[in-house]
Amino acid sequence: MKCLEIRVNGLPAPQGSKRHVGGGVMVESSKKVKPWRTAVAAATEKVDFPELPYVRVSVWFFMPRPKSHFRTGRFSHLLKAGAPLYPGKYPDLDKLCRSTLDALRMGGAYRDDAQVVKLHAWKLFVDQDEEPGALIRISDAEL
């Protein structure tokens, strides 16, 4: 199998804790998770995935830069000298992976999350004129 690639636009959201609301019902603590999982699943459903026993997933999460990273006035398109290179704050990379891997399963990339035996993930900033989201590559883990 060759490497299949999916681009998902939207704000990547972490799958955090669930809270109990009574009657045995658990609810996601973040309201951003459902739209993110829906977007990933919808993009996944457009691709025909073969049955694989083991899967490798590589994902690049593209996060928006806060406005505070940019200069002001006529130089507002330039980054400040002290702007960080990577988004080393919330959301956690592992929780972004959790929500995304669940959504890939929902979209039919594989039957079970346990089939993912290799996972490579990055969290990067997008440029000011780019849309946040994720680039996801899925392939046979034996490649």
Image (spheres, helix red, strand yellow):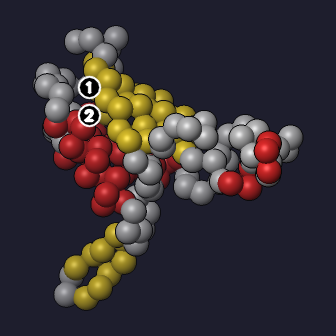
Q: Which residue is mark 2?
A: 115
In the rendered image, residue 141, in percent from the top left (x then y), is placed at 33, 20
Q: Residue at x 38, y 68 (%)?
A: 31
Image marks 2 and 1: residues in contact by CB distance under 8 Å? yes
- Label placed on residue 136: none
Q: Secondary structure at mark 2?
A: helix
Q: CA distance from mark 2 to mark 1?
A: 5 Å
Q: Is residue 92 visible?
A: yes
Which residue in the rendered view is the most extreme toward the bottom?
22
Q: Nearer the viewer, residue 74 or 134?
A: 74
Q: Tell me which label, 2 or 1, sits earlier in the chain.
A: 1
- Mark 1 residue type: Tyr
In the rendered image, residue 22, in percent from the top left (x then y), is placed at 25, 88
Q: Is residue 53 above or below residue 96?
A: above
Q: Which residue is mark 1?
A: 54
Q: Is residue 97 visible?
A: no
Q: Residue at x 22, y 79 (%)?
A: 25
**Number of callouts in the render?**
2
Image check: 120 left or right of 57?
right
Crowding around mark 2 (Cα neighbors within 10 Å: few <14, some 14 to 19, many 20+) is some
- Mark 2 residue type: Gln
Image check: 43 left or right of 134?
left
Q: Is residue 119 above or below residue 68?
A: above
Q: Residue at x 49, y 48 (%)?
A: 94
Q: Residue at x 56, y 38 (%)?
A: 129
**Quadrant of the snapshot with the C terminus:** top left
In the rendered image, residue 66, in percent from the top left (x then y), is placed at 66, 53
Quadrant hosting residue 117:
top left
Q: Secondary structure at mark 1?
A: loop
